[in-house]
């Protein structure tokens, strides 16, 4: 496993926890941090014992408060484009990871922080969470997928409403508009996130992966093609040992012991 400076990666009982670890900078994303996120995702991808990834931020104030403005402000157009490509590549790796990815949003998730959270499958937030894309305040636009993922999550009109006025969304409003899946008191956030993650580890990992593919890939397809994808994956899962084990365990009234095979 790689050594990192700006992120922490721990693995316990099939759950990987990736912590953005720049608390003095409110976990702001500089280029090195983005590169380390991508590298960590590939380390996780290579470990078949990992069933779930949880992403959070160090400290109590911020998940990720945005990109590192001090690093960004001197960039020219070509350098800014390259920075956007690096960020998009990192978050695409998160988005396309085969296992479920949960964001545990403990405070500010602004700019690149919200973009990272939106690359996750599920977003659990603390009651202190504040989310938004404030880039237009700085005369720029989101560059790590914010314009695309926000509209897919909350709808085009709501996304534009939030983007145009750089609106910050508090926890309950985020829950109401579907930006957050669940909201917890700050002291309960990680406990509840891990409780949900542990539930996932008891399910068939290949089936979980196929379900993720069916939903996320199928969402971008016309319905008839998406239904075809679902049928293909449904058939394919019947070629696995886990399907045999899962159905046998059900008939025998015992817990299944899935092997990811």
Image: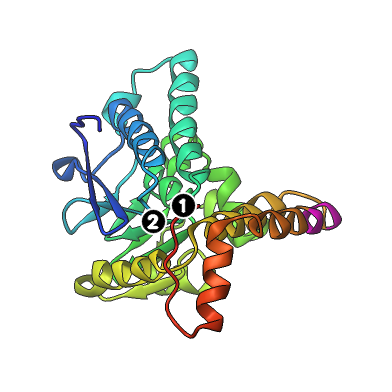
Q: Mark 1 points at which residue?
A: 99
Q: Residue furthest right?
A: 224
Q: Where is residue 174 in the image (x, y as percent from the top left)?
A: 46, 67
Q: Name the residue under label 2.
A: 52
Q: What is the span of residues highlighted in magenta in the rendered image? A: 224-228
Who's the residue at 77% across and 55% down the image? 226
Q: Is residue 167 left or right of residue 29?
A: right
| Secondary structure state at the residue bearing disc 1 | loop
Where is 231 relative to 138, above or below? Answer: below
Q: Which of 217 and 256 is in front in this view?
A: 256
| Secondary structure state at the residue bearing disc 2 | strand
Who's the residue at 70% across and 60% down the image? 234
Give the dominant element type of the magenta stretch: helix, strand or loop.
Answer: helix
Where is 151 relative to 180, above or below? Answer: above
Q: Where is residue 241 in the image (x, y as percent from the top left)?
A: 55, 58
Q: Residue 258 carries which label?
A: none
Question: Does the stretch in magenta take in 58?
Answer: no
Who's the residue at 34% across and 36% down the image? 43
Q: Check the picture and name the quadrant holding the N terminus.
A: top left
Q: Nearer the viewer, residue 50 or 249?
A: 249
The colour scheme used here is rainbow
The reply to whether callout 2 and callout 1 are in contact (CB within 8 Å) is yes
């Amino acid at each position: 496993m790689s050594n990192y400076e700006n992120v922490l990666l721990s693995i316990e009982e099939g759950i990987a926890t990736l912590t953005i670890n720049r608390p003095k900078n409110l976990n702001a994303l500089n280029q090195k941090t983005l590169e380390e996120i991508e590298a960590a995702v590939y380390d996780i991808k290579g470990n078949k014992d990992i069933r779930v990834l949880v992403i959070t931020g160090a400290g109590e104030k911020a998940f990720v408060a945005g990109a590192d403005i001090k690093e960004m402000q001197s960039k020219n157009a070509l350098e800014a484009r390259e920075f956007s490509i690096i960020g998009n590549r990192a978050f695409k790796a998160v988005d396309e990871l085969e296992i479920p990815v949960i964001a545990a949003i403990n405070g500010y998730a602004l700019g690149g922080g919200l973009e990272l959270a939106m690359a996750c499958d599920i977003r659990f937030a603390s009651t202190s969470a504040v989310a938004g894309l404030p880039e237009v305040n700085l005369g720029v636009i989101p560059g790590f997928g914010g314009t695309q993922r926000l509209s897919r999550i909350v709808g085009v009109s709501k996304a534009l409403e939030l983007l145009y006025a750089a609106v910050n969304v508090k926890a309950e409003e985020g829950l109401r508009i579907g930006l957050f899946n669940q909201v917890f008191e700050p002291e309960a956030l990680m406990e509840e996130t891990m409780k949900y993650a542990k539930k996932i580890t008891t399910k068939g990992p290949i089936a979980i992966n196929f379900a993720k593919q069916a939903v996320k890939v199928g969402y971008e397809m016309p319905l008839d093609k998406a239904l075809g994808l679902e049928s293909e994956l449904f058939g394919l899962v019947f070629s696995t040992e886990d399907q045999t084990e899962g159905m046998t365990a059900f008939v025998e009234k015992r817990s299944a012991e899935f092997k990811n095979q």
